[in-house]
Amino acid sequence: MEAADRKRLLQEMVFARRFEERCAEAYHHRDIGGFLHLYPGQEACAFGVLEKARVGHDYVITGYRDHVHALKCGADPKEVMAELYGKETGSSRGRGGSMHIFDVQNHFMGGYALVGEPFPLAAGLAKGAKMKGSDQIAICFLGDGANNQGTFHETLNMAQLWELPVLFVCENNLYAIGTSLERSTPMHDQYKRAEAYAMEAAQVDGQDIDTVMDAAAKAVDFVRSGKGPYFLELMTYRLRGHSMSDSGRGYRSEEEIKRWMERDPIYLFRDRLVEEGVITADDFDRMDKEARDHVDDEVIPFAENSPEPDVKDLTKYVLSDDDSCAMGQIAGGGK
Amino acid sequence: MAEIFYWDAVRRAHDEEMDNDPLVFAMGEDIGLPGGTYKATQGLFDKYGEERVMDTPISENSYTGIGVGASMIGCRPIVEIMSVNFALLATDQIINAAAKIRYMSGGQVGCPLVVRSPGGVAHQLGAQHSGRLEKLFAGTSGLRVVTPAFPVDAYGMLKTAVRCDDPVVILEHEAIYNLKGEVPDEEYFAPLEGARVVREGTDVTLVGYLMSTHWNLAAADKLAEQGISAEVIDLRSLKPIDGATLRASLAKTHKAVICTEDEAPVGMSAEIMAVLNEECFFELDAPPVRVTAEDVPMPYNHELEKAALPDADKIVTATQKLLGH
Ligand SMILES: Cc1ncc(C[n+]2csc(CCOP(=O)(O)OP(=O)(O)O)c2C)c(N)n1
């Protein structure tokens, strides 16, 4: 990978981190409502995998911890923030909120609040791509907790049976809210569960973006070349609580958190780039300041100054605007 | 116009729509190679192949979800769920995903999915195969819910549903797949909204859908022998319910009997009652009456099952009472 690309990638990750930290602040000021699930600590997963996919071309889908995946797919940060503020200019017109960011233009097919729900949707996107004879693949990011849903087993079974072009990325952060993997799942290695469906699978360090990119390149190639689905398990950690109402402390030790903080994916990557001579420590500080300024000067003001949705549009988007099916007046017949 | 079986009408709609658009595909348990439990996809596996007429594993929620995902990018999947009782396992994908995706995405992406599922009480299948869950889907924003009671609607509604940009739940009925009826020889698209007067009358309006429409028709025959002229309305769509057609009928008859195959509490009859109250109140000479299933899980025993369900005689009795005969 070119030095310039490595630098850009770090810059993107830093931006995502500052974007999300600013979300937390806005939440405390009650500018953002509802549930808010942040991603710090896991950035190498979304950035590493999607760097090796074709963003804007491949389909991407995930759960409720979805802001960063949307950003990496090309969603405008201003629109994502406006969505969190519930504004008409938001990526989902203020109808979705934090857990339901959609940017269909960039093929980011949404965040979903029901744990495990996106598994079959991803397989369906892959089925659709296959039917259209396209080389697109579908990528589904979900946590380890989701693997205990029936949809995991049902979907992996069908995806493998029908050789669908779908990449399942398990961001194994060791916890489902406050319940650790040890206390919920007898088989701790998630990739081994996928192997039970005869699926190609691997497990790698999710904090080291180079490792993630290597594994992702292999996985994406496998899926795109028509060999069927792939299951990639990334070992990671969320540095914050599960959501804003969870300190993340009661169920895990300070010592454990500290150990993982030392493996913060952004700082690991920074140190490597400094070592490689791609950037200096000062470059990083400049990058960081730029990211904060971008969020403060452009992203937040856009969200703050955007209009609320008009209440008269309350029932817009429930059904399509096209009335022809209601009336049975379908154009066509014949091919 | 030929007389064909209800199942054959559904099969013909599948065939024509799959022929028309290569992105239409069908999926469900046993619908492919075996030809479908109710023959609704017979012959299509041979014609269109296993990529488009897919036998699925027994995984209702996830294969329905695969249909949702494919529909989001322009495919037109028709998902058959073998029995509406099993559709309960797929309610996450139908109610939480299909029905909400357009709204949650601020209109960016629709979900033109069709879910077909037979329900109702056939004969002595026991409680877990006799579900009537229309209230569940009709009570969900973002879905269209239709109930074709005759072959012509089974054919025309499926064709329209496939081309509709909204998720459509088509509730069929196990006991009427072998009903015969006239279906136009030329292509026909039935509306997904709007009730139909299936028999005209002047003394009372009998309201129903699916099986209860057939019971209402049988009751109307019996009432005619007693000199009572009943108008029968087949709702066809449970969402929205066509209040205008009800009002036009009530303007003639001024009295209504509602018959549904589901239980009364929070059931479809309660919703129909509310529509009559809100839209037809000033046409009513007496409070509408409802004839529904008893509030019990459907028993296996034949006599108990009969006792738990409405039938033409129960409708006749309720009507006589309402009219003061
Ligand atoms: C069907 C369902 N059950 C329960 C919940 C509540 N819930 C939200 S997140 C979560 C934990 C999920 O953990 P995991 O899949 O590991 O993802 P992570 O948050 O760690 O990224 C739970 C139980 C839900 N949203 N949906």
Image (cartoon, coloured by chain):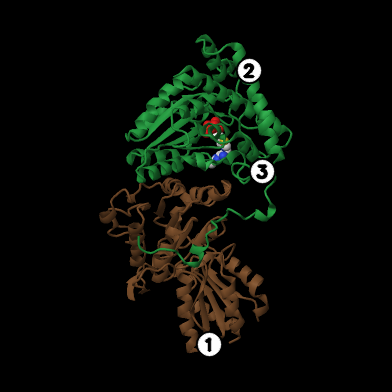
Chain colours: A green, B brown
Please indicate, yes or no, whether residue B300 appears anywhere in the rendered image. no
* Mark found first going from the N terminus, 3 or 2: 3
Q: Nearer the viewer, mark 3 or mark 2?
A: 2
Q: Quadrant of residue B291?
A: bottom right
Q: Amino acid at mark 3?
A: Lys
Q: Amino acid at mark 1?
A: Ile
Q: Residue at x 68, y 78 (%)?
A: B282
Q: Are marks 1 and 2 on the same chain?
A: no
Where residue A286 is drawn, which disc sits there? 2
Q: Which residue is mark 1?
A: B228
Q: Residue at x 61, y 85 (%)?
A: B324
- Ligand 1, by image quadrant, is top right
Q: Are marks 3 and 2 on the same chain?
A: yes
Place of residue B221 in the rendered image (x, y in percent of width and height, measured from the top left):
46, 84
The answer to whether residue A93 is above or below residue B247 is above
Place of residue A106 in the rendered image (x, y in percent of width and height, measured from the top left):
50, 39
Please indicate, yes or no, whether residue A238 appears anywhere in the rendered image. yes
Chain at numbered mark 1: B
Place of residue A295 in the rendered image (x, y in percent of width and height, measured from the top left):
66, 29
Q: How far, Cα to Cα, is label 1 from label 2?
A: 88 Å
